[in-house]
Amino acid sequence: MEVSIAAAEAVKQANVDVISAYPITPQTHVVEHLSELVANGELDAEFFCVESEHSALSVCVGSQATGARSFTCTSSQGLALMSEITYIASGLRLPIVMIISNRTLSSPLSIWNDHSDVMSIRDCGWIQLFTENGQEVYDHVFIAYRLGEDRDVLLPVIVNMDGFILSHVIEPIELIEQNKIDQFLPPYQPLHRLHPDRPVTMGAFALPSIFAEAKKAQEVALRSSMPKVLETWKAFGDMTGRYYRPVETYQADDADTLLVTMGSCGETASVAVDKMREEGRSVGLVKIRLWRPFPFEAFKKATLSAKKLVVIDRAMSVGACGPVASEVKAALYGEAQRPDIYNFVAGISGRDVAPPDFIKMVDKAEIEIQEGNKEGYEIYGVRE
Amino acid sequence: MTENLNVFAVRTLTQKEYFAPGHRSCQGCAEALAVRLVAKALGRNVIIAAATGCMEIVSSPLPFTSWRVPWFHVAFENAAAVASGIESALKVLMRKGRIPTKKIVTLAMAGDGGTADIGLQALSGALERGHNMIYVCTDNEAYMNTGIQRSSSTPFGASTTTSPAGKMAMGQVTWKKNMPAIAAAHNIPYVATACPSYPMDLVQKVKKAADIEGPAYLHILSVCPTGWRSIPELSIKLGRLAVETGVFPLYEVERGRYRLSIDFPKLRPMKEYIKLQGRFRHLTDSMIEEIEKRVHQEYEQLKEKARKGV
């Protein structure tokens, strides 16, 4: 099954009430399939092709606030256009779920995959998850709704799916029986909803005397969602046998050098790790699945025994290092004994990063660090 | 027609207030009056999606609210999209039996900036999709909330903080955007103009909009003493003069058919309206004549449409 189709099937199985989206490559297959499901009566939902991504998310904000489970999906420029509303959705504590079929941001215009779109809204206050394969995308639609709608969380959730590399790939995907889903994810019961029987004002403005308190409440909510994230993954694992963790490790326990990845390139990196292990090199892999709230403790636990980290970023923060690397550095700064960090920006705009590329990056990083370049940063594979 | 416009009939309206007193609007704010009348006309079974603007700022300083009905503010340009979401949610939740089935009106509200400028795309999308909702534009003819900057709804000749009258300029150089015509071009079932100086007419139009299945657009002229540089106690009079001079005719477009709500065999002189407003004080007599000429021309065109019924 194509991963985008699986994602749409998951949205159907999650009994979503309102879907609102605007077409953009490579998100289209998700929305096309959803519109077919609605057209064929397989999904009872209100489906709207609106006139912009800004309105797509605005519709979801309206419908979610009225008590309807809502879904949207976008990529790249579309996400940039709706970015204003991403901040508002989390401030209003509306558990909308959005799949981002990750694609690079212009300019130059490019339809291919990297993480520059989602990194542009890094601080928007949503729970943000990255997936590595189609199964994870499918699974995380249910996880995202259950997690976001938890009364102790009430936050919107982004499920990142690498554009084309995941979205357009056909993979065997294990679907979950509907009765199990219904148990795992009962219908949405909002804490407050817009309804005349119990009038509420939502979206009031705050003067400086109360603004910081409102933002603190949001910060507390996002940070303290961590135990709920773990709880939700545990419940999902008990149901399916597929257990997820905020940080996944592969051959990492005794490794001197660790690759750090996020998203689908983790699988490719694991092939490179196998190859290097065969050659007797002490290399392992750490994959970040949960990006917000950032799993500081789990990440430290996974990496502190290593000597070198090779952090792969799939987005740039022009004028600084990659966003994952800067997060990693912040996470480890307080530790007396910490690994040296070398940062590569690789595979932007969908340029292939194959196993030999990971080996080359590890080679380069090890040499640079040995030569004393302990805060290295470069864009990998640029023709000069 | 005339009994509809009887100012004393306003006493027959409900005493109940859904837009509560104590909000922070300026003295003589006819926009607040318009909103109050809209809320009265719709009663309690309504959900409001409001755009950023004066009416949002005066009514919702956290943790206070002036709203006795469900009210939701998200952003400046998306009231129509948010209302689309509310309407869809009500529809699907009633269909699935998750909330009781009853008539709940979805109302989107925005000022002229949030409608004619930054919110035009979202509005057009919502009208085209045919949501069962009312969109009310309370038009005070500039960005009053941010300090009287010009919008595309500011009338020709008006001095604002971004279209100031100076040695080389005579204020706003463009003619007011015709929002009701743009709304009507979407072939929606109901478009109307109203003014709180004609409260019964306004209330009846709101009620009609609520009864009609599909999108309805109401454009309400809202006198703003702060931005128009007018005397607060003259707001009702200014609204009436806007109508009586032909500057802001009251009409309906029902399923494409134009109808004047009130017709004047002879329009009042433009000067009577313009001279009460500081924003026009730099205009010379010849400029006022020019404006009057175009207003009359447009009024005749409107009458012609109403006569033909198209």
Image (cartoon, coloured by chain):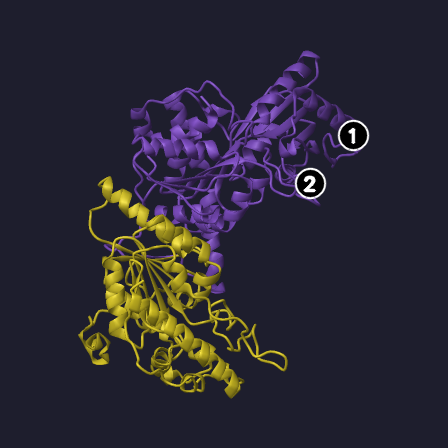
Chain colours: A purple, B yellow
Q: Quadrant of the N terminus of chain A?
A: top left
Q: Give the letter of the chain under mark 1.
A: A
Q: Is residue B227 above or below residue A344?
A: below
Residue A321 marker: 2
Vertical order, B157 against B68 (above or below):
below
Which element type, helix, strand or loop, lies under badge 1? helix
Amino acid type, mark 1: Glu
Front residue (pair B36, B58): B36
* Image x and y of residue B154, in percent: 48, 71
Between label 2 and label 1, give the one nearer the viewer: 2
Q: Which residue is pictured at 32% across the width and 46% down the height? A: B88
Disc 2 is placed on an element classified as: loop
Q: Position of residue B301 (x, y in %)?
A: 38, 70
- Can you see residue A141? yes
* Vertical position of residue B292 compared to residue B213: above or below: below
| Residue at 39% over, 83% down | B232
Task: Give the percent coordinates (x, y) of residue A121.
Answer: 55, 45
Disc 2 is attached to a residue of which chain? Answer: A
Mark 1 = which residue? Answer: A368
Q: Residue at x 72, y 26 (%)?
A: A361
Q: Visible in this render: residue B110?
A: no
Residue A43 falls in image quadrant: top left
Q: Amino acid under label 2?
A: Cys
Q: Quadrant of residue A296?
A: top right
